[in-house]
Amino acid sequence: MNSEPSGLATAVQIEALADQLTLAADELHARVMKSIKAHKDGAISEAEQAVARLLLEDELVLRQRANGLLADAASYVVASLGQSQQAVMQLTADAAEKIRKIERLRDITGLVGGLLMLAGAAATGKVPAIITAIERVSKHVQRVKASTPAKD
């Protein structure tokens, strides 16, 4: 009996599939380009051109789907952080609101850096990095709240 979890049951497995799809897209691109370059005299039939165009469009779709899988894998990991998706979304919404309202650009840099860190960490699917980024954004949101004078 195989003790390995079912396929695509974890973020790691989904990311591995996405990586494989990206490699397939790389190979597809290389193959189409090789075919085009093989026509040294430049005479490529309309039918061959149509096939090449369709394959290059398929390459783009394959890459988009691989990227979509990576995004889904990151969402899966975020959902397993012990924090709700709603809490993470509210934190990022709060940060966006603070960015909109902060008067001095200098005060925005740390908050934006935290958001960039969160975006990068979510894309990697690495829980410790995601947690660190969430804490950094939260800290900067609180710091901005504390330093912003209340308006009546």
Image (cartoon, rainbow, N blue to C red):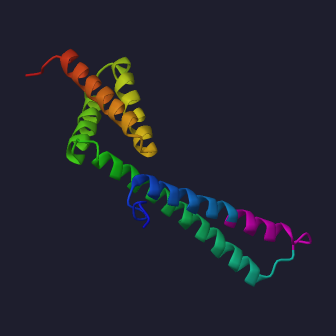
Total tally of numbered discs in the picture: 0
For residue 72, side relative to residue 86 (left or right): right
Q: Main secondary structure of the magenta part?
A: helix
Magenta span has 144?
no
Q: Look at 37% across and 29% down and name the residue there.
A: 114
Question: Dividing the picture into quarters, in which one does residue 60 lie?
Answer: bottom right
**Where 98 falls versus 103 (above or below)?**
below
Question: Dividing the picture into quarters, in which one does residue 8 lie?
Answer: bottom left
Quadrant in the picture for the N terminus: bottom left
Report x, y in % for residue 78. Answer: 32, 46
**Where 112 falls versus 84 (above or below)?**
above
Report x, y in % for residue 40. Answer: 91, 69
Q: Look at 92% across and 72% down and name the residue there.
A: 41
Magenta stretch?
A: 28-42
Most foreground residue, 24 or 111? 24
Magenta span has 39?
yes
Q: Residue furthest right?
A: 41
Q: Residue furthest left?
A: 152
Report x, y in % for residue 76. Answer: 34, 52
**Where 132 falls versus 23 (above or below)?**
above
Q: Look at 31% across and 33% down and name the residue there.
A: 134
Most foreground residue, 146 or 43? 146
For residue 123, side relative to residue 97 (left or right): right
Question: Dividing the picture into quarters, in which one does residue 141 lie?
Answer: top left
**Where 122 falls versus 113 (above or below)?**
below
Quadrant in the picture for the C terminus: top left
Q: Look at 84% across and 66% down and name the residue there.
A: 37
Q: Residue furthest front?
A: 1
